[in-house]
Amino acid sequence: MSGPPSARSTARAAVDDRQNGSDRAAYRATLVELARADSRIWCLDSDMGGLEKQFQAVLPQQYVDLGIAEANLMSVGAALASTGILPFVNTMAAFASARALEQVKIDIAYHKLPVRIVATHSGLSAGHLGPTHHAQQDLAVMRSLPNMTVMTPADASETVRMVNAAAYLPGPVYIRLGRGPTEPVYHGDAGFTVGEAVELRTGSDVTIVAAGSHSVLFALEAAERLAERGIEAAVLNMHTIKPLDVAAVVRAASSTAGIVTVEDHALLGGLGGAVAEAVAEHAPTRVLRVGVSDAFSSRPGGHRAQLVTGGVSPQNVLAAAMAVVSGRSWTATVYSSPTAKESAS
């Protein structure tokens, strides 16, 4: 049994997967390298597809496929963790946060066990699979559980750093991933500390706080558009939802006109709720939330199209930021069809 490998070595191993922009692929490559170096790290599968080729074929003694039985998946993960194993359990976010919630709460969180729940297809990234597979409520659920650390990366390269950091954290961890590739946010090496937001852009007029791949990209795109209008927006990548970087939120609330939050999650209970709670307690200021409207998706469409239809778009981030700066009222634009012009912008 050996200790944890360096983040740099596993990052190099996952370089090919970073190139294709998929946080899911980057995670899987990183997990294999972590498990090669430490036999305590196991992969628990739920028929996700691909892990049997990427992980089981290489490390069969550290792999178990529990099938499509997510509640059992969590209980087995808890049992293994109680013996000193460091299990990474793999399922979709909709199932981790709903179907298996009782087991996550009682078997894992209650006992503070080091189970890493890696949930793909988060938010609306399941796209055409519809509301049964969408996960608009998982952040609200998971951040309410005692002892749980909750994180979501901005791109594939940050996924590598996040998984390395999560592997040896005490207690349970929920890592929220997407499904398909997205454009990179980071270019070159970057640091990562659990619970510390990353300032991607400085600005003194308004602060945009985002979490997750599309959300961070939308925030950066909106900041560019704001700069063209003479408005300087700071952009924070709040990769850790719990523990929230309250200090960074307070600095933003104190140094700019207000805050706009952006997330691939329901407006209720996610990043926007966490930021609003911190602001209300420590530095009251205006907070406008850009998130998925309080409704189930009723139309087919890909990830970005679903987000735009639900109210999460660069245009809405732009409009919300301008409303904060001007002091005007603002209501998100929600489209009736994912083929609306904004979905292609």
Image (cartoon, helix red, strand yellow):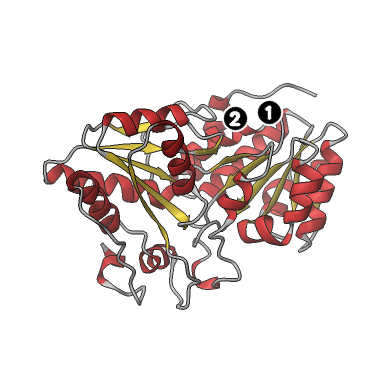
Image position of 175 with respect to 187: above or below: below
Badge 2: residue crowd in 10 Å (few <14, some 14–19, many ≥20): some
Label 2 near label 1: C-beta < 8 Å? yes
Residue drawn at the location 32% of the way across and 47% of the way down: 219
Residue 302, relative to residue 169: is it above or below?
Answer: below
Q: Nearer the viewer, residue 274 or 46?
A: 274
Q: Quadrant location of the N terminus? A: top right
Where residue 205 sits, quadrant-wise, is top left
> Horizontal and vertical percent for residue 122?
55, 56
Q: Residue at x 46, y 26 (%)?
A: 191
Q: Could you say where residue 276 lies in the image, as x and y percent from the top left?
A: 43, 43
Q: Is residue 342 left or right of residue 162?
A: left
Inspect this view and state whether residue 316 appears.
Answer: yes
Q: CA distance from mark 1 to mark 2?
A: 7 Å
Can you give x and y, in whole percent of width and height, for residue 55 in the image? 71, 46
Q: Residue at x 86, y 36 (%)?
A: 82
Q: Is residue 176 above or below residue 125?
A: above
Identify residue type, mark 2. Ala
Q: Nearer the viewer, residue 285 or 27?
A: 285
Q: Residues within 10 Å of mark 1 (few under 14, many from 20)?
A: some
Q: Which residue is mark 2?
A: 165
- Disc 1 designates what residue? 168
